[in-house]
Image (cartoon, rainbow, N blue to C red):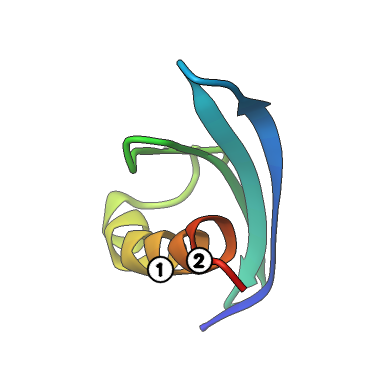
Amino acid sequence: MLVHFQWKDLRNNLLRREWAFSFFHEGQYMTGIYYKNGSIKWGDSNVSAQKKEKLEPYVHDLMLYHVYEQH
């Protein structure tokens, strides 16, 4: 479960859109950059590839909800 999910715009123009995000997962603080095409650049290189694969769908869902949904 992801807790204290936060995001903010890094770039917001026609060519490039990027958002920084952060959250806690199992007591570990995690950060990254989410790109418009759905790719993620993780901030912490100590996280295993398996854990990143597990968390990516959650980050995608949260970004779709917060950035693209009209509330």
Find numbered disc 2 in the image and state the secondary structure of the residue it sits on: loop
Give the distance between the C-alpha atoms of the residues marked 1 and 2, in whole angstroms: 11 Å
* The furthest residue to the bottom: 1
Please report contact status of discs 1 and 2: CB closer than 8 Å, yes or no. Answer: no
Q: Quadrant of residue 23?
A: bottom right
Q: Earlier in the sequence, mark 1 or mark 2?
A: 1
Residue depicted at x 64% and y 41%: 20
| Residue 64 visible in the current orientation | yes
> In this rendering, which labeled residue sits more in front, label 1 or label 2?
2
Q: Amino acid at mark 1?
A: Asp
**Does residue 19 appear to the left or right of 37 in the view shown?**
right
Q: Residues within 10 Å of mark 1 (few under 14, many from 20)?
A: few
Could you say where residue 70 lies in the image, as x and y percent from the top left?
Answer: 56, 67
Q: Which residue is mark 2?
A: 69
Q: Quadrant of the C terminus?
A: bottom right
Residue depicted at x 60% and y 39%: 19
Could you say where residue 24 lies in the image, as x and y percent from the top left?
Answer: 65, 69
Q: Which residue is mark 1?
A: 61
Could you say where residue 31 lies in the image, as x and y percent from the top left?
Answer: 62, 48
Q: Quadrant of residue 37?
A: top left
Residue depicted at x 40% and y 68%: 61
Q: Is residue 43 above or below residue 49?
A: above
Residue depicted at x 30% and y 67%: 54
